[in-house]
Image (cartoon, grey):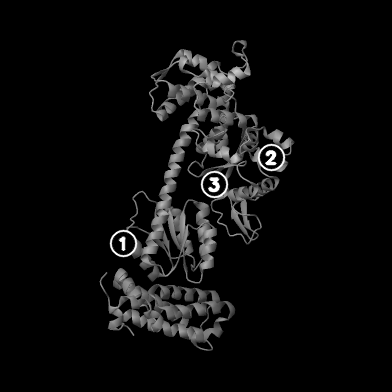
Amino acid sequence: MRHRPVAARQFGFLTQYWPMVLMTLDETTLSALLAMGGEDLRLQLLHDLSRIEGRISPLCCAPPSGATMSSDQLRHLLHEMRGIAVTVGASKLAQACAAAEADTVALPVEAMSSQLSEVVDDCKILRAQIAQHPMTPA
Amino acid sequence: MTRASQSSTDPGLLLVEDTPSIQMLYRTVLTKAGYTPICADSGAAALALFEEHRPGVVLLDLMLPDIDGLAVMSQMLQSAPETRVIVVTANGSVNKAVEATRKGAHDFLVKPLGDVRLVGAVASAFADCRASALRASGANAAIAEKVASVFVAQCDQMQALRTVMRAVAQSKAPVFIHGASGTGKRTAAEAIHALSPRAGRPFVTFKCASLNSTALEGALFGTGPLDQTEHRDSRDCAIRQAQGGTLLLQSPELLAPEHQARLLAVLNNASLTLSASEELPVDIRIICTSSRDPHDAMRAGQLSDELFYRLFVFPISMPSLRERSEDIPALVDLFLPEIARQEGKQFSTIAPDARAALQRQSWDGNLHELRNVLRQAVVLNDGPELTAAMLPLSQTVHKGTAATDTPAAQDVHSALIGMTLAQIEEFAIRAAIERHNGSIPRAAQELDIAPSTIYRKRDGWTDPSL
């Protein structure tokens, strides 16, 4: 869901509760960021998310499809993705990243395919949302 | 958005963030606010840029791909302690940010960063930089003025001392300056600092007699050595404030034995123990001053043998003003314009009879007494010439010549003529402190007042040094 109902837009005070109800992305935050950074920022966000997703995706298969990565490297990638997610207001992806990041301490990378699949799925959704988000003037 | 553009005189801003999109976002926000950040995407790149540009403010992501952000911050602060480092961390890593603050970070920000918060933190850090620079330049100007008085050296003894001070200034070894009250011990310490390679770094004075044991430990060392539950911010302790510069310890023989032992450990290990598992590298030059002969203090058991030999590397003995009476005319030439300016008076010349009268005095109160006499003359008279008749020399105790010997009570009475009540009080307090070799607690006991009363009153004196 990209656009809020008309009622939410008309009654601004409601928008602060909107993300908690059903949104995976706080579009107000994303709008403000893209208004600030423009198309260059959008492209860079998409590029960064694709890069991280591309490194995590091979680890989602159980057993992993020949991909190897240390727990530290995986933790850093998840932390990086979490940084982007919290910055653009993607709370669901941020939570998934945080949970997976915490699991890297106790679990081997090979045992994390389900957590990583959730991260990758949410990342795909976020990329689509960012790609389709309308640009608004600053 | 907050507008807080960077002044052209501000040191640079270094932005350290490894995720390109986040770095782009922060850079955009900061640029629109008027800053021109230089950017690094790794710890190694950040350290290289830091060495090259010496930025005043660093915005540092704690999670970097190659080096831990805390290690990067520590290296930066060790190299340039005056740097303001703002650490950035993701939500959930707040403990790390708190640890960074304990280790010297100026501020910490938790992602997601709002643009107002980001720009506000950077603006605050730059404001802090500017305030410190102003304080440092003001302090340096004051030091330069005082240093001049030390280098008024017509007599052989002071000329030799000047040569020694110039030489020891180039070393990092401790200096121990002793001499009677008012001989210029603190000024000599400031002169050594000003002449040293550390001149642009902090000069911190710590009075070892000024606090109770617990407060002293916090003020000097920050925290107790093994107190792991204590999370008090130790950045304000004297040792950390003096990092990279000079720490002046006044009357170190008055430190309690356990504090002497801890100071010895800091000097021996070149590190400050913050907790059982945490050591902070320390780079300070120690100068001690005392009105008591440190040999006597050691023999009396007040100063431990180990600390004495660690501190008493370059001993400097400050001569009394009586011993350097040849310097008095030059000192008067130096002090009179300064005092006249402070008091809004015009005094440009000194009559020969005034010079002669000043040189005849015994000056038991040394430079303090000379300044007091000149100030009274300036306040109570008009220039442009300072004559002998203007000098309230009766306040000084004349010794050594039969012509000036008078009953003590008459001396004291005549010494008070022309002084305000506040000046009489200052005179009495200074005399008591001198009688007790610089010990304020003992002087307070004699005067039947609390030591804090003396400290409070001293803050109001024109020259609060003792």
Q: Disc 3 versus disc 2: distance between alpha carbons?
A: 21 Å
| Marks 3 and 2, the one that precedes in the sequence | 3
Q: Are marks 1 and 2 in contact (CB under 8 Å)?
A: no
Which element is circle 3 on?
Answer: loop
Counting from the top left corner in percent of width and height, residue B261 is at 69, 47
Counting from the top left corner in percent of width and height, residue B206 is at 58, 42
Q: Are marks 3 and 2 in contact (CB under 8 Å)?
A: no
- Pick the residue in front: B4 or B399: B399
Residue wearing tag 1 = B32
Which element is circle 2 on?
Answer: helix
Which element is circle 1 on?
Answer: helix
The amino acid type, in three-letter code, at marker 2 is: Phe
Q: Is residue B350 left or right of residue B449?
A: left
Vertical placement of B247 versus A109: above or below? above
Q: Residue at coordinates 42% horizontally, 30% vertically from top-left?
A: B342
Q: Chain of mark 3?
A: B
Q: Chain of mark 2?
A: B
Classify mark 3: residues with Cα within 10 Å, few (<14), some (14-19) or many (20+). Answer: many
Q: Residue at coordinates 38% horizontally, 19% vertically from top-left?
A: B384
Residue wearing tag 2 = B308
Counting from the top left corner in percent of width and height, residue B189 is at 55, 36
- Where on the picture, by quarter, is residue B317? top right
Classify mark 2: residues with Cα within 10 Å, few (<14), some (14-19) or many (20+). Answer: many
Q: Is residue B254 visible?
A: yes
Q: Disc 1 versus disc 3: distance between alpha carbons?
A: 36 Å
| Marks 1 and 2, the one that precedes in the sequence | 1
Vertical placement of A15 versus B124: above or below? below
Query: Which quadrant of the rendered structure holds the N terminus of chain A?
Result: bottom left
The dot on residue B242 is 3
Q: Disc 1 versus disc 2: distance between alpha carbons?
A: 57 Å
Vertical placement of B91 versus B430: above or below? below
| Marks 1 and 3, the one that precedes in the sequence | 1
